Image (cartoon, rainbow, N blue to C red):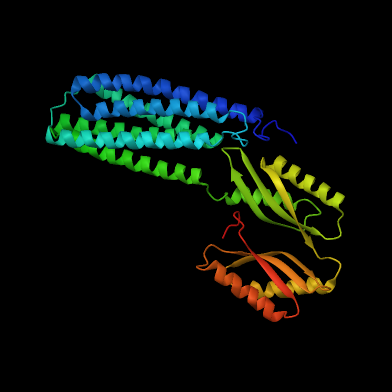
């Protein structure tokens, strides 16, 4: 297996190292741009007495902190596995994304508090032509920077960069609104600063809550994407000796660090040596095509020598699959001599009482085949799309 562009057992390949460098470089660009914008806006805001511009400068400083945290998280996530964390530290990237979300949320809350205070103690802002020009330039810079950071984040699958990019795009809207308030004040004499700052604060809070929700979901453990599951299953099924692939379970240990297990169905006529070769072929193909490391491949032996068992499987499948929320029957094995039968049932999460449906289907099969001792497992395939 090649490790030029993937990650094997937590050891970074060239692709992983390039990804880290890209994240750090993009974050450093963001730090530089936001420091300059914050300095300009702070000077203008205090000189003109504009609360909205000052808050905009503070928001730029929070962006600097976000970029610094992204760099720190990327460095920590690249640490090699050890005894305490044998699967590495990749999930730290999700924690840094959560911290950035909290920073955005905190900035929105503090801005809202200041805005409310300003509503009750308003002051007359003093705008100058240079200040308005700089705000206009800031709008353009934040649009360009936001689009750039977000696109890079999506390309390298970095939630921290994506969050920073979205935040920057939101900043451009905030700056544009601040510029609009200044123009309204200069042309009509209406003081919209405090009101505008309050609206800006609510937008920031909403964005922060959305980011926090997404990152918390990843930390808790989300269901694998249908695209990833399909790619892994396609790679497994491409092996000639594999009759069926089931029970795929993938564990996310950070971006590009996914391990998992799968059950494969093979003919019961294979020797132990042949099965060993099949397992090696499956793990190699999955890694080469998807970058996913299969740490376990379990075997279902499919009856192939007795036509009556093939017919038996078809009859059992017809009985259980008539139920709408039974997604799949697999792992079927029967022994006519000893009168035993076993299979796995995958039942949809849409079913209100999965255990009740499982028991009902099992009893129906037992009633249809009273001469067999029928057992079944209630199974969950975390990768199935329903």
| Count of marks overlaid on the render | 0
Pick the quarter of the image with the N terminus.
Answer: top right
At x 32%, y 40%, the residue is: 205
Left or right: 185, with 351 as reference point: left
Residue 160 placement (x, y as % from top left) = 47, 34
Left or right: 282, with 137 as reference point: right
Residue 291 placement (x, y as % from top left) = 67, 40
At x 71%, y 47%, the residue is: 296
At x 52%, y 37%, the residue is: 154
Residue 30 placement (x, y as % from top left) = 43, 25
At x 34%, y 27%, the residue is: 60
Left or right: 261, with 142 as reference point: right
Pick the quarter of the image with the C terminus.
Answer: bottom right
User: Relative to residue 142, is residue 245 depicted above or below?
Assistant: below
Residue 77 placement (x, y as % from top left) = 55, 31
Frontmost residue, 385 versus 106: 106
Left or right: 335, with 168 as reference point: right
Residue 336 in sight here = yes
Toward which corner of the image does residue 175 lie, by quadrant? top left
As drawn, the residue found furthest toward the front would be: 83
Residue 192 in sight here = no
């Amino acid at each position: 297996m090649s490790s030029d562009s993937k990650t094997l057992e937590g050891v970074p390949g060239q692709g992983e190292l390039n990804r880290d460098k890209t994240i750090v470089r993009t974050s450093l660009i963001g730090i530089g741009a936001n420091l300059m914008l914050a300095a300009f806006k702070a000077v203008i805001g205090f000189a003109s007495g504009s609360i909205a511009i000052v808050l905009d400068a503070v928001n730029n400083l929070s962006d600097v902190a976000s970029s610094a945290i992204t760099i720190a998280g990327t460095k920590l996530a690249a640490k090699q596995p050890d005894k305490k964390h044998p699967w590495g530290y990749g999930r730290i990237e999700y924690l840094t994304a959560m911290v950035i979300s909290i920073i955005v949320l905190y900035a929105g809350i503090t801005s809202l508090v200041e805005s409310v205070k300003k509503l009750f103690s308003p002051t007359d802002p003093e705008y100058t032509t240079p200040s308005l020009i700089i705000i206009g330039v800031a709008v353009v810079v934040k649009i360009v920077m936001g689009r750039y950071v977000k696109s890079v984040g999506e390309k390298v699958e970095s939630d921290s960069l994506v969050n920073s990019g979205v935040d920057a795009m939101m900043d451009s809207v905030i700056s544009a609104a601040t510029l609009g308030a200044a123009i309204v004040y200069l042309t009509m004499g209406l003081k919209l600063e405090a009101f505008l700052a309050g609206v800006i604060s609510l937008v920031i809070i909403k964005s922060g809550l959305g980011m926090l929700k997404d990152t918390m979901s990843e930390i808790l453990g989300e269901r694998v994407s249908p695209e990833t599951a399909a790619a892994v299953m396609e790679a497994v099924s491409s092996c000639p000796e594999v009759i069926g692939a089931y029970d795929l379970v993938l564990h996310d240990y950070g971006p590009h660090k996914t391990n998992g297990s799968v059950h494969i169905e093979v003919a019961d006529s294979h020797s132990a040596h042949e099965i060993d070769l099949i397992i090696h072929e499956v793990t190699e193909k999955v890694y080469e095509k998807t970058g996913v490391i299969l740490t376990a491949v379990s075997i279902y032996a499919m009856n192939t020598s007795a036509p009556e068992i093939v017919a038996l499987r078809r009859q059992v499948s017809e009985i259980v699959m008539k139920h709408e929320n039974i997604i799949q029957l697999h792992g079927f094995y029967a022994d006519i001599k000893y009168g035993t039968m076993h299979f796995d049932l995958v039942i949809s999460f849409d079913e209100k009482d999965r255990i009740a449906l499982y028991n009902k289907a099992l009893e129906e099969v037992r009633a249809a085949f009273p001469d067999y001792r029928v057992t079944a497992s209630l199974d969950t395939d975390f990768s199935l799309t329903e």
